Image (spheres, rainbow, N blue to C red):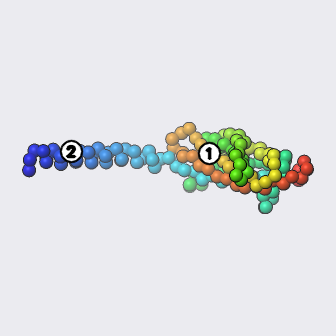
Amino acid sequence: MSGLEISRGAGTAVAAACLAVTVAALAPQAEAAGAPNLSVSMSGASVGPVKIASVGCGQTAVATVKMADGTPVSRGYVEFTSHLPNMGGNVVGTVPVSDGTASILWIPGVEGQHTVSAFYFDDSSDTRPAVGQTTIDAVNLNGMCV
């Protein structure tokens, strides 16, 4: 063997060792970030099992945020949005999470099937973002809330 071949072998071994150390150092950080489960529901006077709301009448959008083990998330924020199919949407608002829930008043402005989405985020590196959504049909009852 020549000295050059030994250098190549040693160089490869050193490179492999550096890569292994780098991967090992990053692995705990990647595993520490957990992805919560997020579900979205609606409540209000006219929301029932068929998810119907009256145009112009307030409903409450509720995001439930829990870790995989069922522990409620106690920090971070949820941004709620609403949109109709094939149309742009709007931000309903951003609210803090408290004891695994975040809620906000939502008032449908037009008839149609609305998708209400929730996006959970936190400034810490130990919890990853999560999203969820629900659909609700808004009907026009000429200002009558039921």
Q: Which residue is mark 1?
A: 120
Number of numbered discs present?
A: 2
Q: Which residue is farthest left?
A: 1
Position above or below: 91 against 113: above
Residue 113: percent from left, percent from top = 76, 55
Q: Residue at x 68, y 49 (%)?
A: 117
Residue that appears at 81% across and 52% down: 111
Task: Give the residue at x 84% y 49%.
Answer: 55
Residue count near mark 1 (Cα–Cα under 10 Å), binned few <14, some 14–19, many ≥20: many
Judge from the rendering whether residue 54 lies leftward or rightward of residue 39; answer left or right.
right
Between residues 122 and 135, which one lies in front from this camera angle?
135
* Amino acid tagged 2: Gly
Q: Residue at left 58%, top 41%? A: 122
Residue 77 percent across, percent down from the top left: 63, 41
* Dot label at residue 53: none
Q: Residue pushed farthest top?
A: 123
Residue 97 seen from this side: no
- Whole-percent x, y for residue 39 in the image: 66, 54
Query: Mark 1 is on which residue type?
Result: Tyr
Q: Is residue 109 visible?
A: yes
Q: Specify which label sits upstream in the sequence, 1 or 2.
A: 2
Element at label 1: strand
Q: Secondary structure at mark 2?
A: helix
Pointer 1 with pointer 2, Cβ within 8 A: no
Nearer to us of marks 1 and 2 is 2
Name the residue carrying label 2.
11
Q: Residue 74, percent across and down? A: 62, 44
User: Is 12 placed left or right of 89 in the picture?
Assistant: left
